[in-house]
Image: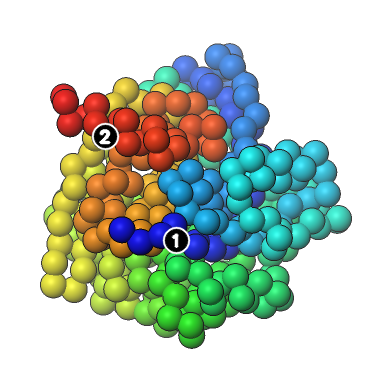
Amino acid sequence: MKPSPNITVVGSINMDLVFRTPRMPAVGETISGHEFVQIKGGKGANQAVAAARQGAVTTLIACVGNDAYGQQSLSGLHADDIVTDFISIINHCATGVAGIFVDDSGHNSIVIAPGANAQLSPSHIDAAKHAISSATLLLCQCETPLATVSAAIQIAHEHGVKVVFNPAPAIPLPDALLAKVSYLIVNETEAEQLSGIKVTNLTTAQTASKNLLNRGAACVLLTMGEQGVCITEQHNSQHIPAIKVTVIDTTAAGDTFVGAFATAIGLGLSTIEAAKQAQYSAALTVTKLGAQSSIPTKAEVERFMVEQLKV
């Protein structure tokens, strides 16, 4: 196995305001919740933390506001030894915030106010060019401007750096951008929005994935929650079943999968083996409440894998 990979993440930093509720309120309805907690999050930060906790040397390129949420977020990243040299503090913006409602089944609904995340620009990417060009992998999402994401992917492409792209939330993407992506990771909703094909089972997952392959992506990983993961390449398609656990909160499960997968690929694992390992990380995540607070360490994942083999 290779030494620890260098993973550079371009993405968002949010403070998650999480409400535990018995169910989702209807339009115009007020209900009493179980509890409220404040947890560090944001897809970029979550994926960076997931990669770091699996052993990657991780750098995050992002923006926060000059406020308490920004300082708390930076402190959390420092605690995970994430390089924050390219995180800019924006004086005229608040740090991004996500309002998250989690019901008793563990499913969630999320509303995001991007704040400083919307200020991450191609100029920030240019200033961090070496962090991208010298990385093992680049990891991106869509909670920051597409022009910024595109600039980062272009630098990676020019320097032969593999790109793991999780286009969430889904937005229209040019085929020319997808053609520079090594691993495209989407869930059912994102796959449908990008391909126009509704994903309800393994067959439709494969059809949607092939559509995205035809648009340029080299490999598509379609995560389907309790239905597992569908992995599709030009001449190969495989399905990895989900790992059964008691679900508390699905927040950050996808982000954990992405960060853990990127680290495993950087360590030299095959696509299938990397996805299997990422499945264990994501499964552990849903057994706890919150985003970064629920992301497991490498040691926790290894113990969990041993326990599952005994079942």
Q: Is residue 18 in view?
A: yes
Q: Residue furthest right?
A: 91
Looking at the rendered structure, the secondary structure element under dot 2 is: helix
Proximity of marks 2 and 1: CB atoms separated by less than 8 Å: no
Above or below — where is 20 with respect to 96?
Answer: above
The quadrant of the rendering that contains the N terminus is: bottom left
Where, by quadrant of the figure, is residue 212 drawn? Answer: bottom left
Q: Is residue 5 left or right of residue 42?
A: left
**Image coords of residue 37 (percent x, y):** 62, 24
Q: Sequence order check: which comes first, mark 2 or mark 1? A: 1
Q: Residue at x 67, y 77 (%)?
A: 126
Pick whichever, 127 or 106, lies toward us.
127
Circle 1 residue: 5
| Residue in the picture at 61% in, 51% down | 82
Tell me: 84 left or right of 101: right
Q: Quadrant of residue 106?
A: top left
Q: Is residue 116 above or below residue 277?
A: below
- Crowding at dot 1, Cα within 10 Å, few <14 / some 14-19 / many 20+, comes out as many
Identity of the residue furthest to the bottom in this view: 158
Which mark is drawn over residue 305? 2
Q: Amino acid at mark 2?
A: Met
